[in-house]
Image: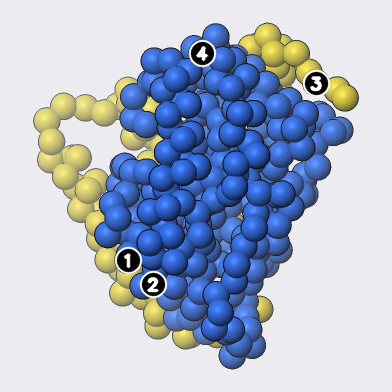
Amino acid sequence: MYYIDPHIHMVSRTTDDYETLAKMGCVALSEPAFWAGYDRGSVDGFRDYFEQLTVFEPKRAGWYGIQHFTWLCINAKEAENVSLAREVIAMIPEFLDRPGVLGIGEIGLNKNTKNEATVFLEHVELALRTDEQILIHTPHLEDKYQGTRMILDMLCDDGRVNRERVLVDHVEEHTVRLVLEQGFWAGMTLYPVSKCTPARAVDIVEMYGPERLLVNSAGDWGPSKPTAVPDFILEMRRRGHAESLIRRVVYENPIAFFSQSRGFVFNPPDVAEHANV
Amino acid sequence: MNVRKSAAVFEQEFLPVRAKLLEVAAALDRLDRADGSLATDARRAKIQAAIQVLLRPEDDRAEQIQLIFSRPFEDDWRKKLGVSEVRK
Protein backbone atom coordinates (compact mmCIF):
# COMPACT_ATOMS: atom_id res chain seq x y z
CA MET A 1 0.00 0.00 0.00
CA TYR A 2 1.23 3.49 -0.82
CA TYR A 3 1.58 5.71 2.20
CA ILE A 4 2.85 9.14 3.23
CA ASP A 5 4.84 9.68 6.42
CA PRO A 6 3.75 13.17 7.51
CA HIS A 7 6.45 13.60 10.16
CA ILE A 8 9.95 12.17 9.85
CA HIS A 9 13.39 13.74 10.36
CA MET A 10 15.33 12.38 7.43
CA VAL A 11 18.41 14.57 8.00
CA SER A 12 19.08 12.14 10.87
CA ARG A 13 18.59 9.04 8.76
CA THR A 14 20.73 7.28 6.20
CA THR A 15 20.21 7.04 2.46
CA ASP A 16 19.57 3.33 3.03
CA ASP A 17 16.53 4.35 5.09
CA TYR A 18 15.14 6.25 2.09
CA GLU A 19 15.55 3.07 0.05
CA THR A 20 13.81 0.98 2.71
CA LEU A 21 10.93 3.47 2.98
CA ALA A 22 10.46 3.36 -0.79
CA LYS A 23 10.39 -0.44 -0.74
CA MET A 24 7.74 -0.33 2.00
CA GLY A 25 5.43 1.86 -0.10
CA CYS A 26 6.34 5.35 1.09
CA VAL A 27 5.73 7.78 -1.79
CA ALA A 28 6.05 11.08 0.08
CA LEU A 29 7.06 12.44 3.46
CA SER A 30 7.19 15.71 5.31
CA GLU A 31 10.10 16.75 7.48
CA PRO A 32 9.57 19.40 10.16
CA ALA A 33 12.54 21.40 11.41
CA PHE A 34 13.60 20.16 14.84
CA TRP A 35 16.32 20.06 17.46
CA ALA A 36 19.69 18.73 16.30
CA GLY A 37 20.56 17.22 19.68
CA TYR A 38 22.49 20.39 20.60
CA ASP A 39 21.61 24.07 20.58
CA ARG A 40 22.71 25.83 17.41
CA GLY A 41 24.78 28.92 18.02
CA SER A 42 23.69 31.37 15.34
CA VAL A 43 21.05 32.26 12.80
CA ASP A 44 23.43 31.11 10.07
CA GLY A 45 23.36 27.64 11.58
CA PHE A 46 19.62 27.60 10.92
CA ARG A 47 20.07 29.07 7.45
CA ASP A 48 22.34 26.14 6.58
CA TYR A 49 19.84 23.69 8.09
CA PHE A 50 16.97 25.15 6.05
CA GLU A 51 19.16 24.89 2.95
CA GLN A 52 19.63 21.20 3.67
CA LEU A 53 15.87 20.72 4.26
CA THR A 54 14.82 22.49 1.07
CA VAL A 55 17.57 21.44 -1.35
CA PHE A 56 19.55 18.34 -0.41
CA GLU A 57 16.90 16.23 1.33
CA PRO A 58 14.40 16.54 -1.58
CA LYS A 59 17.20 15.46 -3.89
CA ARG A 60 18.17 12.48 -1.71
CA ALA A 61 14.51 11.41 -1.37
CA GLY A 62 14.07 11.75 -5.11
CA TRP A 63 16.76 9.14 -5.76
CA TYR A 64 14.18 6.61 -4.52
CA GLY A 65 11.06 8.19 -5.99
CA ILE A 66 9.96 9.71 -2.68
CA GLN A 67 8.61 13.27 -2.69
CA HIS A 68 10.02 15.35 0.15
CA PHE A 69 8.21 18.26 1.82
CA THR A 70 9.31 20.32 4.79
CA TRP A 71 8.35 22.76 7.56
CA LEU A 72 10.55 25.52 9.01
CA CYS A 73 11.01 26.94 12.51
CA ILE A 74 13.27 27.05 15.54
CA ASN A 75 12.35 24.17 17.83
CA ALA A 76 10.90 24.75 21.30
CA LYS A 77 14.00 23.22 22.89
CA GLU A 78 15.98 26.22 21.59
CA ALA A 79 13.34 28.79 22.52
CA GLU A 80 15.00 29.73 25.81
CA ASN A 81 17.36 31.85 23.72
CA VAL A 82 14.62 34.30 22.75
CA SER A 83 16.87 36.74 20.90
CA LEU A 84 18.24 33.97 18.64
CA ALA A 85 14.71 32.62 18.15
CA ARG A 86 13.60 36.05 16.97
CA GLU A 87 16.50 36.24 14.51
CA VAL A 88 15.52 32.84 13.10
CA ILE A 89 11.83 33.77 12.86
CA ALA A 90 12.81 36.94 10.97
CA MET A 91 14.96 34.86 8.57
CA ILE A 92 12.40 32.09 7.83
CA PRO A 93 10.51 34.05 5.12
CA GLU A 94 13.65 33.82 2.92
CA PHE A 95 12.73 30.12 2.47
CA LEU A 96 8.93 30.06 2.51
CA ASP A 97 8.51 30.23 -1.27
CA ARG A 98 10.91 27.39 -1.98
CA PRO A 99 9.38 24.25 -3.53
CA GLY A 100 8.13 21.74 -0.98
CA VAL A 101 7.84 24.10 2.00
CA LEU A 102 4.48 23.37 3.64
CA GLY A 103 4.52 25.88 6.49
CA ILE A 104 5.79 26.65 9.98
CA GLY A 105 6.74 23.71 12.19
CA GLU A 106 7.26 21.85 14.31
CA ILE A 107 6.61 24.63 16.78
CA GLY A 108 5.21 24.13 20.25
CA LEU A 109 6.32 23.66 23.83
CA ASN A 110 8.89 21.46 25.52
CA LYS A 111 9.00 22.22 29.24
CA ASN A 112 6.04 24.62 29.09
CA THR A 113 7.99 27.75 30.04
CA LYS A 114 7.28 31.42 29.51
CA ASN A 115 10.00 31.76 26.84
CA GLU A 116 8.68 28.75 24.95
CA ALA A 117 5.17 30.23 24.98
CA THR A 118 6.53 33.58 23.78
CA VAL A 119 8.44 32.04 20.87
CA PHE A 120 5.47 29.81 20.02
CA LEU A 121 3.16 32.81 19.76
CA GLU A 122 5.67 34.67 17.57
CA HIS A 123 5.85 31.67 15.22
CA VAL A 124 2.04 31.60 15.04
CA GLU A 125 2.08 35.30 14.23
CA LEU A 126 4.54 34.64 11.39
CA ALA A 127 2.35 31.82 10.03
CA LEU A 128 -0.73 34.02 10.10
CA ARG A 129 1.07 36.93 8.47
CA THR A 130 2.42 34.74 5.65
CA ASP A 131 -0.68 32.51 5.34
CA GLU A 132 1.26 29.35 6.17
CA GLN A 133 -0.03 26.11 7.65
CA ILE A 134 1.20 25.14 11.12
CA LEU A 135 2.60 21.85 12.45
CA ILE A 136 2.75 21.63 16.24
CA HIS A 137 4.97 19.58 18.53
CA THR A 138 3.43 18.71 21.89
CA PRO A 139 5.74 17.99 24.83
CA HIS A 140 6.97 14.61 26.01
CA LEU A 141 5.76 12.35 28.82
CA GLU A 142 4.66 14.18 32.00
CA ASP A 143 4.68 17.57 30.26
CA LYS A 144 2.40 16.55 27.38
CA TYR A 145 -1.03 17.05 28.94
CA GLN A 146 -0.22 20.42 30.46
CA GLY A 147 1.62 21.63 27.34
CA THR A 148 -1.10 20.48 24.96
CA ARG A 149 -3.72 22.34 27.01
CA MET A 150 -1.55 25.48 26.97
CA ILE A 151 -1.03 25.24 23.19
CA LEU A 152 -4.75 24.79 22.58
CA ASP A 153 -5.48 27.76 24.85
CA MET A 154 -3.14 29.97 22.82
CA LEU A 155 -4.50 28.82 19.45
CA CYS A 156 -8.17 28.97 20.43
CA ASP A 157 -7.76 32.48 21.82
CA ASP A 158 -6.78 33.76 18.40
CA GLY A 159 -9.76 34.02 16.08
CA ARG A 160 -7.50 34.37 13.05
CA VAL A 161 -6.28 30.76 13.34
CA ASN A 162 -7.96 28.43 10.84
CA ARG A 163 -7.98 25.21 12.85
CA GLU A 164 -8.31 23.02 9.75
CA ARG A 165 -4.86 24.22 8.69
CA VAL A 166 -3.18 23.26 11.97
CA LEU A 167 -1.81 19.80 12.82
CA VAL A 168 -1.24 19.09 16.52
CA ASP A 169 1.22 16.23 16.66
CA HIS A 170 2.24 13.51 19.12
CA VAL A 171 -1.28 13.08 20.56
CA GLU A 172 -1.95 10.16 22.89
CA GLU A 173 -4.97 8.82 24.75
CA HIS A 174 -5.19 11.78 27.13
CA THR A 175 -4.82 14.54 24.51
CA VAL A 176 -6.38 13.31 21.26
CA ARG A 177 -9.96 14.16 22.22
CA LEU A 178 -9.04 17.71 23.24
CA VAL A 179 -7.36 18.32 19.87
CA LEU A 180 -10.06 16.80 17.67
CA GLU A 181 -12.95 18.40 19.55
CA GLN A 182 -11.43 21.82 18.95
CA GLY A 183 -11.36 21.19 15.20
CA PHE A 184 -7.62 20.67 14.69
CA TRP A 185 -5.90 17.82 12.89
CA ALA A 186 -4.19 15.32 15.21
CA GLY A 187 -1.02 13.31 14.55
CA MET A 188 -0.08 10.09 16.32
CA THR A 189 3.64 9.36 16.57
CA LEU A 190 4.74 5.74 16.72
CA TYR A 191 7.76 5.35 18.98
CA PRO A 192 9.28 2.23 20.53
CA VAL A 193 8.97 3.45 24.15
CA SER A 194 7.39 6.90 24.52
CA LYS A 195 4.39 8.28 22.60
CA CYS A 196 2.14 5.73 20.77
CA THR A 197 2.67 2.14 19.77
CA PRO A 198 1.08 0.91 16.54
CA ALA A 199 -1.51 -1.04 18.57
CA ARG A 200 -2.51 2.01 20.65
CA ALA A 201 -2.68 4.17 17.53
CA VAL A 202 -5.10 1.67 15.98
CA ASP A 203 -7.10 1.75 19.24
CA ILE A 204 -7.39 5.52 18.83
CA VAL A 205 -8.60 5.17 15.23
CA GLU A 206 -11.19 2.66 16.44
CA MET A 207 -12.36 4.99 19.20
CA TYR A 208 -12.38 8.31 17.30
CA GLY A 209 -12.66 7.32 13.63
CA PRO A 210 -10.30 8.41 10.84
CA GLU A 211 -11.45 12.02 10.51
CA ARG A 212 -8.51 14.47 10.81
CA LEU A 213 -6.18 11.75 12.16
CA LEU A 214 -2.66 11.16 10.85
CA VAL A 215 -0.02 8.63 11.81
CA ASN A 216 3.74 9.13 11.57
CA SER A 217 7.07 7.64 12.58
CA ALA A 218 8.84 10.86 13.61
CA GLY A 219 12.00 8.89 12.86
CA ASP A 220 14.99 10.92 14.03
CA TRP A 221 18.42 10.52 15.68
CA GLY A 222 16.98 8.95 18.85
CA PRO A 223 15.30 5.58 19.43
CA SER A 224 12.72 5.54 16.63
CA LYS A 225 11.70 3.40 13.70
CA PRO A 226 11.36 5.02 10.28
CA THR A 227 9.19 2.14 9.06
CA ALA A 228 6.67 2.51 11.92
CA VAL A 229 3.82 3.50 9.59
CA PRO A 230 3.92 0.10 7.84
CA ASP A 231 3.75 -1.43 11.34
CA PHE A 232 0.52 0.53 11.86
CA ILE A 233 -0.80 -0.71 8.50
CA LEU A 234 -0.05 -4.29 9.49
CA GLU A 235 -1.80 -3.89 12.86
CA MET A 236 -4.87 -2.45 11.11
CA ARG A 237 -4.92 -5.47 8.79
CA ARG A 238 -4.45 -7.92 11.67
CA ARG A 239 -7.63 -6.50 13.17
CA GLY A 240 -9.53 -6.91 9.93
CA HIS A 241 -9.97 -3.24 9.04
CA ALA A 242 -10.85 -2.39 5.45
CA GLU A 243 -8.06 -1.38 3.09
CA SER A 244 -10.06 1.76 2.31
CA LEU A 245 -9.93 2.80 5.99
CA ILE A 246 -6.19 2.15 6.23
CA ARG A 247 -5.57 4.07 3.03
CA ARG A 248 -7.66 6.95 4.34
CA VAL A 249 -5.41 7.34 7.40
CA VAL A 250 -1.98 6.77 5.85
CA TYR A 251 -2.45 8.28 2.39
CA GLU A 252 -5.61 10.29 1.80
CA ASN A 253 -5.58 12.19 5.10
CA PRO A 254 -2.02 13.52 4.67
CA ILE A 255 -2.90 14.63 1.14
CA ALA A 256 -6.08 16.34 2.38
CA PHE A 257 -4.18 18.22 5.08
CA PHE A 258 -1.12 19.13 2.99
CA SER A 259 -3.25 20.22 0.03
CA GLN A 260 -4.14 23.35 1.95
CA SER A 261 -0.54 24.49 1.53
CA ARG A 262 0.57 26.27 -1.65
CA GLY A 263 3.89 24.42 -1.35
CA PHE A 264 2.26 21.01 -1.71
CA VAL A 265 2.65 19.96 -5.34
CA PHE A 266 2.12 16.22 -5.22
CA ASN A 267 2.56 13.82 -8.13
CA PRO A 268 0.62 10.64 -7.25
CA PRO A 269 2.22 7.32 -8.20
CA ASP A 270 1.39 6.20 -11.74
CA VAL A 271 -0.02 2.85 -10.62
CA ALA A 272 -3.50 3.33 -9.17
CA GLU A 273 -4.57 1.35 -6.13
CA HIS A 274 -8.09 0.15 -5.42
CA ALA A 275 -9.46 2.01 -2.42
CA ASN A 276 -12.17 -0.53 -1.63
CA VAL A 277 -10.36 -3.85 -1.62
CA MET B 1 -15.63 0.57 11.18
CA ASN B 2 -15.01 -3.12 11.77
CA VAL B 3 -16.18 -4.21 15.27
CA ARG B 4 -14.53 -7.43 16.40
CA LYS B 5 -15.92 -10.10 18.68
CA SER B 6 -14.48 -10.06 22.19
CA ALA B 7 -13.50 -13.74 21.93
CA ALA B 8 -11.41 -12.99 18.84
CA VAL B 9 -9.74 -9.97 20.47
CA PHE B 10 -8.99 -12.03 23.58
CA GLU B 11 -7.49 -14.79 21.48
CA GLN B 12 -5.11 -12.24 19.95
CA GLU B 13 -4.36 -10.35 23.17
CA PHE B 14 -4.13 -13.09 25.82
CA LEU B 15 -0.47 -14.03 25.40
CA PRO B 16 0.78 -10.43 24.90
CA VAL B 17 -1.15 -9.26 28.00
CA ARG B 18 0.13 -12.20 30.02
CA ALA B 19 3.69 -11.38 28.94
CA LYS B 20 3.33 -7.68 29.80
CA LEU B 21 1.86 -8.45 33.23
CA LEU B 22 4.80 -10.76 33.93
CA GLU B 23 7.24 -8.03 32.86
CA VAL B 24 5.62 -5.56 35.28
CA ALA B 25 5.53 -8.14 38.08
CA ALA B 26 9.18 -9.06 37.55
CA ALA B 27 10.21 -5.38 37.47
CA LEU B 28 8.40 -4.76 40.77
CA ASP B 29 10.06 -7.85 42.28
CA ARG B 30 13.42 -6.51 41.05
CA LEU B 31 12.75 -3.22 42.80
CA ASP B 32 11.86 -5.03 46.03
CA ARG B 33 15.05 -7.07 45.93
CA ALA B 34 17.18 -3.94 45.53
CA ASP B 35 18.73 -2.22 48.52
CA GLY B 36 17.16 0.94 49.93
CA SER B 37 13.69 2.48 50.00
CA LEU B 38 11.59 4.31 47.42
CA ALA B 39 9.05 5.50 49.97
CA THR B 40 9.75 9.17 49.20
CA ASP B 41 9.92 8.79 45.40
CA ALA B 42 6.64 10.09 43.94
CA ARG B 43 7.13 8.00 40.82
CA ARG B 44 6.77 4.78 42.84
CA ALA B 45 3.39 5.99 44.12
CA LYS B 46 2.34 6.76 40.55
CA ILE B 47 3.19 3.22 39.49
CA GLN B 48 1.04 1.95 42.35
CA ALA B 49 -1.85 4.24 41.34
CA ALA B 50 -1.57 3.12 37.71
CA ILE B 51 -1.79 -0.53 38.77
CA GLN B 52 -4.98 0.28 40.65
CA VAL B 53 -6.47 1.75 37.46
CA LEU B 54 -6.01 -1.60 35.73
CA LEU B 55 -8.54 -3.12 38.14
CA ARG B 56 -11.28 -0.61 37.29
CA PRO B 57 -14.13 -1.69 35.00
CA GLU B 58 -14.15 1.50 32.88
CA ASP B 59 -12.91 1.43 29.27
CA ASP B 60 -10.66 4.50 29.54
CA ARG B 61 -7.85 2.91 31.56
CA ALA B 62 -5.12 4.00 29.14
CA GLU B 63 -6.26 7.63 29.33
CA GLN B 64 -6.49 7.50 33.12
CA ILE B 65 -2.99 6.06 33.44
CA GLN B 66 -1.67 8.77 31.11
CA LEU B 67 -3.17 11.39 33.42
CA ILE B 68 -1.55 9.81 36.50
CA PHE B 69 1.83 10.33 34.83
CA SER B 70 1.03 13.91 33.76
CA ARG B 71 1.73 17.24 35.39
CA PRO B 72 -1.56 18.99 36.24
CA PHE B 73 -2.92 21.75 34.02
CA GLU B 74 -3.81 25.04 35.65
CA ASP B 75 -6.33 27.35 33.96
CA ASP B 76 -4.46 30.43 35.16
CA TRP B 77 -1.11 29.36 33.65
CA ARG B 78 -0.86 32.64 31.70
CA LYS B 79 -1.02 34.70 34.87
CA LYS B 80 1.55 32.49 36.59
CA LEU B 81 3.97 32.63 33.63
CA GLY B 82 3.27 36.25 32.74
CA VAL B 83 2.11 35.42 29.20
CA SER B 84 -0.57 37.81 28.00
CA GLU B 85 -3.70 36.57 26.27
CA VAL B 86 -4.02 37.02 22.49
CA ARG B 87 -7.58 38.00 21.62
CA LYS B 88 -7.83 38.90 17.95
Residue A84: mark: 4
Q: Nearer the viewer, mark 2 or mark 3?
A: 2
Tell me if mark 3 has few (under 14), some (14-19) or many (20+) residues whose alpha carbon lies within 10 angstroms of its own: few
* CB within 8 Å, label 2 to label 3: no
Question: Disc 4 to disc 3, how far (Cα)?
Answer: 23 Å
Amino acid type, label 1: Thr
Q: Is residue A236 left or right of residue A245?
A: left
Q: Is residue A26 left or right of residue B57?
A: left
Task: Give residue A233's position: percent from left, percent from top.
Answer: 47, 73
Amino acid type, label 2: Met
Residue B86: mark: 3
Amino acid type, label 3: Val
Colour of chain B in the image: yellow
Query: Would you name the residue on which mark 2 appears?
Result: A24
- Identified at 36% across, 72% down, the residue is A23
Colour of chain A in the image: blue
